[in-house]
């Protein structure tokens, strides 16, 4: 049942102009940064007279392409997650889902899987972009995969947050705005609490944990943080829908 819901959600994204528009704009911006980073790399390396100044093309390209993608996710995730549950409420089809022979866990996980599948296409396209340089340059595939995996975990965690916010309102626009605000807060938490005496808040920053992957480090602590973050909001969403089913 989870896969059925995920396929339905994925088809609905591509059945509307919004899904294709987000995909096109994302690819256009990332493709532009890809081209600029490629040209800038050879300009910088040409002027780097000392070997110590030289860095790998994989790191340089990934920092440019994945860096802008991480910022774009701040806007993309609220746009594609705002309708997950709120539109069901708006169209008054939520009662049908509540009465259907499926659990709220299956509904939430199915919708999350659908949006994650859609967003994963964006990450795969970026990996393919950089990997296409293999015939002409040495590509550090472990670094590239680690960086992409970190962005994917960031995307899953952000999608879980957006899904929970979508459960709280029947207005998709309000859900998108609240998701954007909440994501901005969680991403920049380390900037708000940069003092060492507030290290607890600092460690809750999504961007702080993503930076470890961006540097090529695969740390189980950072993986666990993203998994628990996503699980926390998934459980909150399930609990919210359970309350709606019980009390209306």
Image: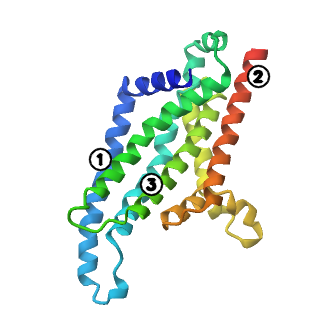
Q: CA distance from mark 2 to mark 3?
A: 37 Å
- Report the disc number at residue 243: 2
Q: CA distance from mark 1 to mark 3?
A: 19 Å
Secondary structure under tag 1 reads: helix
Which residue shows up at 61% across the image and 10% down it?
Answer: 96
Q: Is residue 166 above or below residue 50?
A: above
Indicate the quadrant where residue 51 lies: bottom left
In the displayed structure image, the side of residue 211 where residue 33 appears, left or right: left
**Residue 161, position as x, y percentages in the image:** 62, 40
Residue 52 seen in this snapshot:
yes
- Camera-side residue of 26 and 152: 152
Q: Residues within 10 Å of mark 1 (few under 14, many from 20)?
A: few
**Residue 85, position as x, y percentages in the image:** 59, 25
Which residue shows up at 40% across the image and 47% down it?
Answer: 123
Instruction: Give the residue at mark 3.
Output: 148
Instruction: Give the residue at mark 1.
Output: 28
| Residue sticking out furthest to the left | 136
């Amino acid at each position: 049942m989870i896969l059925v819901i995920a396929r339905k959600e994925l088809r609905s994204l591509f059945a509307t102009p919004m899904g294709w528009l987000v995909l096109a704009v994302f690819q256009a911006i990332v493709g532009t940064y890809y081209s600029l980073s490629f040209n800038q790399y050879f300009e910088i390396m040409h002027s780097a007279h000392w070997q110590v100044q030289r860095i790998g093309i994989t790191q340089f390209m990934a920092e440019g392409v994945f860096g802008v993608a991480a910022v774009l996710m701040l806007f993309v995730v609220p746009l594609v997650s705002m309708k997950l549950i709120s539109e069901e409420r708006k169209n008054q089809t939520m009662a049908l889902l509540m009465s259907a022979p499926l659990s709220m866990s299956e509904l939430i996980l199915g919708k999350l899987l659908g949006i994650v599948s859609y967003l994963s296409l964006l990450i795969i396209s970026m990996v393919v972009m950089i990997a296409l340089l293999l015939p002409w340059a040495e590509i550090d595939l472990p670094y590239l995969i680690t960086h992409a995996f970190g962005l994917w975990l960031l995307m899953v965690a952000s999608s879980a947050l957006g899904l929970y916010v979508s459960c709280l309102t029947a207005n998709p626009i309000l859900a998108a705005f609240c998701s954007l605000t909440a994501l901005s807060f969680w991403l920049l938490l380390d900037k708000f609490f940069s003092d060492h005496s507030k290290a607890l808040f600092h460690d809750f920053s999504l961007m702080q944990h993503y930076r470890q992957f961006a540097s090529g480090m695969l740390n189980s602590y950072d993986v666990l943080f993203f998994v628990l973050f996503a699980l926390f909001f998934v459980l909150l969403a399930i609990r919210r829908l359970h309350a709606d089913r019980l009390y209306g």
